[in-house]
Image: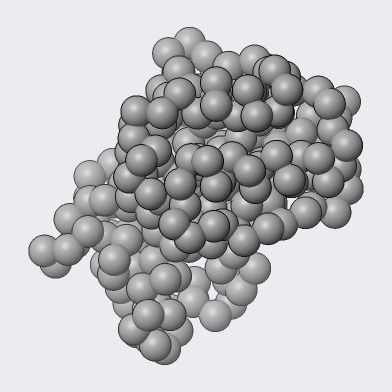
């Protein structure tokens, strides 16, 4: 079965049909740059462009980098503040000629995909997926069940929002070496571990394609740390899964088991 997924990020918007039997893209993804400023109208236009690139006319799942409840975006740390309070599912449905659109947090989507098809498959206990990119997204699972919208990238670390020190954008903006950045990521993971005592960390986002550059350099963390197996396609796959289930994660709704 194929369902369409779109992953909205701070720098790019990408999507593709997803084969839910395999948990992988059915076609090569299409990507466009996130407009600046990343307003609801501008981003919605890009989502439409990505969907129409494939002549897709069925349901669509969409991720958003912020808190999402019942299709409404509640935060927008790395997007235009005009997103706060927008019924994003309704907006995108209207722009996509009335087709059903399911919207959920981007890291939650990636986590659902990894727990079903990737590095978290069959893993019990507490698992935390962290997407390192423009910011830091998080997805928290207990025995395969998602606790939605955790937003652990905004924990305070050394007096700063954690993602301003340990995201990939922080590495690039500060021109940090892999060693220096891995040190920051390790401090962040140790802080999260102190709070939640996870059995496993899964590191997602584009940087998951280069685990040998930084994972061996991380120290001071007891939990196992592995790269996301679906890498940067996890959000698209998770979005398609949410569209197939007909609802974003919430009480009694989303489970990776």
Residue 103 position within the rendered picture, expressed as x and y whole percent measured from the top left? 55, 28
On the rendered structure, is 5 left or right of 189? right
Q: How many marks?
A: 0
Q: Is 84 drawn above or below residue 226 in the view shown?
A: above
Rendered residue at 28%/70% (across/down): 165
Q: Is 206 drawn above or below residue 83 in the view shown?
A: below
In the picture, the quarter occupied by the N terminus is top right
Rendered residue at 86%/42% (across/down): 54
The residue nearer to you, when weighing 195 against 135, is 135
Instruction: Kindly tell me whether residue 156 is visible in this rendering.
Output: yes
Q: Which colouring convention does the figure follow?
A: one colour
The residue nearer to you, when weighing 59 against 120, is 59
On the rendered structure, is 6 left or right of 145? right
Rendered residue at 58%/17% (across/down): 247
The residue nearer to you, when weighing 211 against 10, is 10
Place residue 179 in its image quadrant: bottom left
In the picture, the quarter occupied by the C terminus is top right
Instruction: Kindly tell me whether residue 219 is visible in this rendering.
Output: no
Rendered residue at 70%/28% (across/down): 96
Q: Is 252 drawn above or below residue 40 in the view shown?
A: above
Place residue 166 in its image quadrant: bottom left
Residue 216 position within the rendered picture, expressed as x and y whole percent measured from the top left? 49, 76
On the rendered structure, is 132 left or right of 181? right
């Amino acid at each position: 079965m194929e369902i369409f997924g779109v992953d909205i990020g701070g720098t790019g918007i990408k999507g593709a049909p997803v084969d839910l039997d395999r948990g992988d893209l059915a076609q090569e993804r299409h990507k466009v740059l996130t407009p600046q400023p990343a307003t609801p109208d501008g981003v919605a236009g890009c989502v439409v462009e990505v969907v129409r690139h494939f002549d897709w006319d069925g349901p669509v799942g969409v991720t958003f980098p912020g808190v999402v409840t019942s299709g409404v975006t509640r935060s927008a740390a790395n997007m235009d503040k005009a997103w706060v309070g927008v019924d994003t599912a309704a907006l995108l449905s209207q722009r996509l000629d009335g087709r059903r659109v399911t919207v959920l947090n981007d890291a939650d989507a990636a986590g659902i995909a990894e727990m079903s098809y990737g590095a978290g498959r069959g893993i019990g206990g507490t698992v935390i997926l962290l997407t390192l990119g423009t910011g830091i997204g998080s997805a928290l699972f207990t025995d395969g069940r998602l606790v939605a919208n955790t937003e652990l990238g905004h924990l305070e670390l050394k007096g700063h929002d954690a993602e301003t020190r340990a995201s990939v954008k922080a590495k690039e903006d500060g021109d940090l070496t892999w060693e220096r950045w891995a040190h920051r990521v390790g401090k962040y993971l140790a802080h999260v571990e102190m709070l939640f005592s996870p059995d496993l960390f899964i590191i997602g986002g584009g940087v998951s394609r280069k685990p040998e550059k930084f994972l061996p350099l991380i120290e001071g963390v007891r939990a196992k740390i592995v790269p996301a197996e679906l890498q940067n396609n996890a959000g698209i796959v998770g979005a398609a899964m949410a569209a197939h289930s007909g609802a974003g994660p919430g009480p009694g709704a989303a489970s990776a088991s």
